Image (tube, helix red, strand yellow):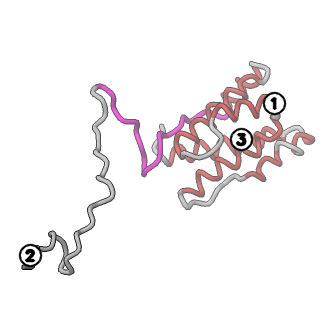
Amino acid sequence: MTEQTTPPPGDASGLPSAAPAFAPAPSYAPAPGHAPAPYHAGNGPVGQIRGTGVCIALAICTFGIYTLVWYYKVHQEMKNHSGAGLGGGVALLLAFFVSIVMPYLTSSEVGNLYARRNRPAPVSGTTGLWYFPGSFIIVGPLIWFIKTNGALNDYWRTQGAA
């Protein structure tokens, strides 16, 4: 006598249905008392607007030390906002040891912020040419800083910074 078995549950072919390979991850609420960081259009927190004249005055009064602080803060804010770029620590090390590359990198990163939003970039890596060899006409670094800091401030304003 032959036994008749019933096929396991599944599709019409009699084959068992495939179980999902993994369960979806649960979503967790923020810890009590900790509000999530403000995000704008899928990006990280918005950076701080820095007055160009104030930054220039601080750089002069501190004999250039404020430029290291500025590079650190600006690059950290751009990294926190976009998730890309050097970050503050790397920018500080580069500014301290090979400072000549920083105007090119900073202008490039500011331009990339605009490019990620599909907007025309007012500055780019070539804007760094105002710094060097622009320093031979003495006002070149000032022109670079006014253009780059102004573009960064304008970007932060479009993202809701006050």
Local packing at callout 1 (Cα closer than 10 Å; few below 14, some 14-19, many 20+) is few
Mark 2 or 1, nearer chain start? 2
The kind of secondary structure element at disc 2 is: loop
Q: Which residue is mark 3?
A: 146
Position of residue 20 measured from the top left corner of the image (x, y, whole percent): 29, 60
On screen, residue 117 above or below 92: below
* Left or right relative to 4: residue 51: right
Which residue is found at the position 15% from the left and 69% from the top?
A: 9
Comparing labels 3 and 1, the label whose residue is closer to the camera? 1
Query: Circle 2 sits on which residue?
Result: 3
In the shown orientation, is residue 155 left or right of residue 43? right
Query: For mark 1, what is the residue?
Result: 97
The magenta stretch spans which residues?
33-52
Q: Is residue 36 left or right of residue 135?
A: left
Dominant secondary-structure state across the stretch colored magenta:
loop
Toward the top, the furthest residue is 62
